[in-house]
Image (cartoon, helix red, strand yellow):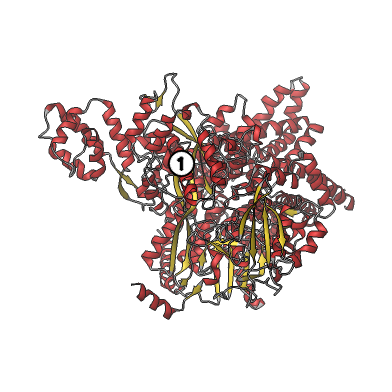
Amino acid sequence: MTAYILRRLLQTAVVILLLSYFCYLLMTLMPGDPVDEMIMANPEITSADIDRLRALHGLDQPVWVRYWNWASSIASGDLGYSRTYRVPVTDILGPRLLNTFVLAGAALLVAVIVAIPLGVWAALRKNSTADYVINLFAFAGISVPSFWIAIVLILVFAVYIPIFPAGGTGSIAFDMTPWESFVDRLKYLVLPVLSLSFLSIGTYVRYTRAAMLESMGNDYIRTARAKGLGWPRIYLMHGFRNALIPLITVTALSFSTLFSGAIITETVFAYQGVGQLVFESIQSNDFNVAMVAFMISVSMVLLMNLIADLLYGVADPRISYA
Amino acid sequence: MSESAAVPKVHQQAQYEAQSMASILLEQFLEHRMAVIGFSVIAIFLAIALLAPVISAVSGLDPDRQNVFNRYQPPGSHLDLSTHERELRVQTFLRQSDRSELVRFLADRELLEFAVDDEDLLYELVTQHASIHLAGMLLELQSEAPDSARSDLHALRNLVAEFRSFHLLGTDELGRDVLIRLVYGTRVSVTVGLLVAFVSGLIGLLVGSLAGYYGGRTDAILMRFTDALLSLPILVVLIVVSAIDLGKVFGGTPLAFIVESRHESVIKMILILCLFSWMQAARLVRGSILSIKEQEFVLAARVLGAKDRTIIGAHIIPNVIAPLLVAVTLGIGNAILFEAALSFLGLGIQPPTPSWGNMLNNAQEMVQHAPTLAILPGLLILFTVISFNYIGDGLRDAIDPKSIRR
Amino acid sequence: MSTRALIALALLALIAGVLAYVRPQLMRPGELPTNAELKIGITQEFENLNPIVMSMVATTYIYRMVGRSLIQLDEDSQWLPQLATQIPTLENGLARRVSDGEREWIEAEWTIHPQARWGDGEPLTCRDFRFSWEVGLSPNVGVPNIEIYRQIRDIHIDPDDPKHCTFEYREALWNFNRHHLLYPLPEHLERPVFELHAEQPEGYEQNSNYTRDPTNPGLYSGPYRIVNLGLGSHIILERNPHFFGEEAHIERIVIMLIPNTGTLEANLRAGSIDMVSQLGMSFDQSLAFANRVQAQELPFRVNFQPGLTYEHLDLNLDNPFLADIRTRRALVYAIDRQGLVDALFGGLQPAAFHNLAPTDPWYTEDPARIVIYRHSRRKANRLLDEAGWVWRDDGYRYNADGERLRLRLMTTAGNKVRELVQIYLQDQWRGIGVDVRIHNDPARVFFGQTMRRREYGGIAMYAWSSSPENNPRSMVSSESIPGENNGWSGQNYPGWSNARVDELVDELDRSFDEKERLDLVHEILWHYTSEVPVIPLYYRSETSVTPINLTGYRIPGHQISAANHVERWRLMDAEELTRYRSDAQ
């Protein structure tokens, strides 16, 4: 088991390393550089200024040299300096990461809480009206453009019926008790979480339903039924437990989807998260920030894959790691 | 929703043996009601996409025609064309043939309150009067007109009658008709969706069958590559990639014409989406090949000395096609969603070409002033994607041997 | 239709009814903000507020609330001292032309306001200016525009009075004293950081107190100081008790970054922000919002102020079609600029005749001094006929070689207003048989590559924003045509070369006589409008939304932000507002 985990971790590290170079290369393929950003803001900059600034920022060196410098400073624990904000990357990334984890975590939680009962219900009442409605809802969830649902939510719940703030991360005020500021944060979270969890709900409902149907068809369920076990026991202990495996996979894998989704959600809701930061930093060529955020997200996905594999073992004792 | 459709049709069971595979599949598919509805919706959308120029010609609406003094008009507005457009049409009218008789006739009628050169008369006439008013005036003059000018006058009246347009869904930020832009947007979005899904299905088939059939090192390399791509946060990569300038990539190559064409951003969108959406298909194909490869009929073929090409072509691909078809159908929906997302962020299809995504981009900040502009394109995306997803679901049920024994 | 469906319908109706009842109560009553706090929304990102390295527009906006420059440009485009007590000129004797026989330069005496202090009470002196000049010239500091510092050869501080010093300039230029971008740095806080990190590239800016300790009051000299800085999120400002000028009325200002314009507006209506700065709504949105404010009597004022930002089209004179002056003139005649600004901007952004804005003291629209092109499609068509462009049935014009009159129109992708104008122009030019193809690049490619290397094949749309009374050398002189020989410097992107204009820009720098300068500028304008290397479009207007009870607020028509006089802003209470309104009627 330990050997297996170690081997997988090593593989993951190699993949991360390769991907980081690939990403760095992609970023340099984008035209323009941070200095061009300054030119736009200030037409009085002269060509000599531009060359001076390029040299100062090391932008006149070949890609691999710049990558090497970047990678070695990362390895030494220095995440670099944000060109856009003119502060160390950690200063800007830390709070953003926290915000995104709160958002994505809440969305995941909501999705699981809503989707699993719905999926189980749909499976147990297969081909009933409830099944059709739940299915339609799930299909709508996976088919709706997330930015559009965000706009509609703003239109309905912030403009027509103004019960939630239209966007932002929280009110900016000094005189709030911890409880008040907690409630305030929650209020700001409702709409983004709703819009972000919509997609996941659709996916999870479909997988839960399919997995439930699959496991309900197994012989041991029939056996259990024949033994005269009560239905909650059959469905929850036997049926659902087996349905869990594909569900765990999907949940773990959907982390990448949540992260991508967060870019759009955070942009529309002006939520101060990593997704928005990534978008902004790519747009403004803020290499250090974009790369670090990028690497975090890639590592997260790869780690989640690993965790999903490991969790199989917990949920299904037949799988072992030799 | 009634429950009658869900009752299995037992009497059909007996017919299965006599049916061909295709008709079984068709029947299975038709039993999936939502899939059938989805299919009809898509058929309608495809028809709209194909017939867009016809719709444009019949309705007299043009997706690019502006009316800047009538921006953000609500649904159901009757509007006069912009003065610029009216003048342009008069210009064409004058260039078509010699209209001097008509102009002389009209000049004598003193229809304007101020004097103008004959040369400018028609221009002034169409811009000074509202078109309904003008058409009425011209009708009254019909009887007085000399023979030499009568047919021209009639032609002018027809021209003026077309100066008024009806906008069922209102107008956008340049006074363009929203309905016809949605129609053309269907064209762009559906084309992108279909092409991307098809091409990435092909790439997936190629990569997946190479990996699955040859196994070993080929498999390891191809699949590690696929997995690595899959682990990338796709939207982030697309944002980066869409910033790359095609002009630099294709400059000087035979493909340079793409950059020059009016549809550069559409082609670019398709290329980019294809590059990053074949991975699921590849894994799927590899998976099914691995299971098929070990089956007896393939072994038999190999023992009989069949070439790799024959085995892949004659035995493996036909068995892989069905699941691939499902994946491709579902892929269409995803491609449409990605196109919309990128266009929404301003990185996809560039104006003036309408796509549902970029229409939403424009509408977003005006959502409080003109909500229909933001709601409609999103609804169309939703309907299209949900339809493709239901079709995919229906196909999956149809080819799934377990579901035949429902 | 079953009973279930009926119940569902009834439920829906009930919900709708409840919402219809609840909604008006949820809408906030128009509570007016008070002097206790003003919350301002912006959409553009800002960086940390080190005045010497800041380069983002939003940062320069905010900086004016916490920091002051040596001199300023007020709302009426008058030059006034800010940290200085007086602006030295040749006339008032504080500046003099000095010559050593070979070169000529200027020396000027500056005196810093006696009460000027940093936020920690430390006096602000010439030493702080000398220090910022020193930092600005350091090769390891990423100063955006080094010319601000390079024009000064040395700063001599009076040994008896650190508030008094003499600037020795490198050259004798008439506009030597325009130091509105020269900011002091607090030497007592920043000197140690600078000395420690001077040798390391970017060492100073990464370790500066502005980066590491941005709420240190000693860093700021303006009416406010920063008490909380959340990059990418918000800034909280409070009154600076050590400010040397009049005390600000508003106790606390919160600036919130809401990068999405739609969300920004929703926040404004919900009351979570009170005001939208110039860096907020798009023009289109402001226009729609202004209508809404009027229709629903919302407690806001939407401000429009034409500025110095000059939107125009550069015509690439290397393009064989555009090399012909008749084609260029036809293109100008064909576009209805007044129609454009009326239709798209409600007439609130003025149409342009040339590169100088109406707020510039050098501005003229005298038909005797410049060439004015009134919209006339007939003239445009005649010019194209003369140039040998013949109509064909497809509605476009072709030359003798059978080439279609096709031009590429480029601008920055994602700028909605420009994209609208672009499509409008495309349509107008179609009317004279010109086939215009739109091709847009992301802003950084457009400016960093396409324009700088003159790779735009036909027409490019973008804007300049320059100080009033600015020598147009970099845009019109033939030396400023970017190319291999000058290291791609200069912004004469059309490639316009006119020997007389080259002379004129040189004379302009050397002329110390106001009247003479005006004549020189107008002659340049005459050539500029006559030869049409550039098609002027319009001057961009700044827009902002302020609470109806805010007084003392004005958007200046130039690049120094409205926040320059933030200490005058005041929020009236309801009673005063009523009085004020009845006075106004």
Residue C570 visible to the viewer: yes
Quadrant assignment for the N terminus of chain C? bottom left
Where's residue A196, x and y in %?
Answer: 60, 57
**B231 is higher (above) or lower (below) than C190:** above
Instruction: Name the quadrant containing residue C328.
Output: top left
**C218 is higher (above) or lower (below) than A271:** below
**B153 is higher (above) or lower (below) than C102:** above
Q: Secondary structure at mark 1?
A: helix
Horizontally, residue B215 falls left or right of residue A260, namely right
Crowd rating for badge 1 (residues with CA inside 10 Å; few <14, some 14–19, many 20+): some
Question: Which residue is nearer to you in this view: C328 or A237?
Answer: C328
> In the rendered structure, the residue with mark 1 lies on which chain?
C
- The furthest residue to the front: C101
Where's residue A8, x and y in %?
Answer: 83, 48
**Residue at image mark 1:** C523
**C59 is higher (above) or lower (below) than B339:** below
Instruction: Name the quadrant containing residue B393.
Output: top right
Quadrant assignment for the C terminus of chain C? bottom left
Where's residue A14, x and y in %?
Answer: 82, 44
Residue B24 visible to the viewer: no
Horizontally, residue C399 falls left or right of residue C412, namely left
Question: Which residue is nearer to you in this view: B101 or C104?
Answer: C104
Question: Which residue is nearer to you in this view: C564 or B319?
Answer: C564
Instruction: Name the quadrant containing residue C133.
Output: bottom right
